[in-house]
Image: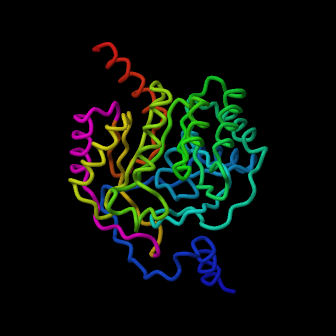
Amino acid sequence: MDKDEVMVETKKLRHPEKQHKPDNPIKRKPAWIRAKAPVSKGYQETRKIMRDLNLRTVCEEASCPNMGECWQKKHASFLIMGEICTRACSFCNVTTGKPDALDNWEPVRVATAIQKMNLRHVVITSVDRDDLEDGGAEHFVKVIEETRRLAPNTTIEILTPDFKGKKDAVATVAKAKPDVFNHNLETVPRLYPSIRPGASYFNSLNLLKTVKDLDPNTFTKSGIMVGLGETREEVMQVMDDMRSADIDFLTIGQYLQPSVKHAEVKDYITPEQFKSYETLAKAKGFLVVSATPMTRSSYHADEDFEQLKAARESKNAVA
């Protein structure tokens, strides 16, 4: 088997459900979308820690364009419960298939890495685990508890799946009191059947509302991608829906197409349009808004957490 055949076979194994789909040519990126190459010393040191402890990151699995910059600073978003997702979202580059059994030692290894990296703030996310009764809620709790044990000064942000709308699973994780509870809506309701099949816009919205109902002091966060064919009016409606659920932090970033088998980029949104979205979102009452072409859920998460705390303190002082 030559090199090209190996590459084709690898892609088939990574996204077998997408192979029958027609190709969507990848549009040339505009000048304002540029990513740093992952070559720095800090990047290599971060990579070594991950490999030594047999850990995965969403930075790698989702082909994040900010990985070079973030890993240089030893910032990494941990991906727990394996690298195989039970969902087949058309925007996502994480492998789809049947996951392995949970690794009971993973929480300790994640916490050890956080301790070694001396992180002041960490983002922990996961693949969807629809094969598990609780969607992996208890595993999230174990990772949070081990992190608090080994790295007590690190603030914890989690980015969870939707747990199939099960409020008991959401409550299980919320009771562990992460500092930030993030769950992404990803796109506007109209595009869910093609972009996020198997998920429900209103389940995701209700998940975040449930977190706030359980503990109003927990910061909540959510994000969407733009450039998938959504309208400005639809984005504004999502903002209103998020505020109705009392979500504190909104992220908006440009969708970038991982391969020709993924959803097509319909538009590259200009920096000026992103700035307009940021202005609108702040006017609607979000404590913090990150809206740029390169924004991702965990991009600059440590700095944004400091902004969140400051914004709440300022709001409470005025009230």
Does 265 sit left or right of 127 as displayed? Answer: left
- Count the marks: 0
Which scheme is used to colour this image of the protein? rainbow
Going by the picture, which residue comes out furthest to the bottom? 1
Is residue 266 located in the magenta-colored stretch of the structure? yes
Displayed quadrant of residue 130: bottom right
> Residue at image x 36%, y 41%?
250
Asked if 271 appears above or below 8 in the picture, the reply is above
Indicate the position of residue 194 as horizontal and vertical percent values.
40, 68
User: Residue 298, position in %: x, y?
Assistant: 48, 43
| Residue 144 position (above or below residue 131) | above
- Residue 171 % position (x, y): 57, 36
Which image quadrant is residue 5 in?
bottom right
Tell me which residue sits at (37%, 70%) in the image: 264
Report the quarter where the N terminus lies.
bottom right
Say if 128 sits above or below 125 in the image: below
The range drawn in magenta is: 261-288
Q: Is residue 37 left or right of residue 151?
A: left
Residue 1 in the figure: left or right of residue 61:
right
Determine if the magenta segment contains residue 21: no
Q: Which residue is most to the right? A: 105
Q: Residue at x 74, y 52 (%)?
A: 102
Query: In which quadrant will I find the C terminus?
Result: top left
Q: Give coordinates of residue 247: x percent, y percent.
A: 38, 36
Residue shown at 60%/66% (left/top)? Answer: 96
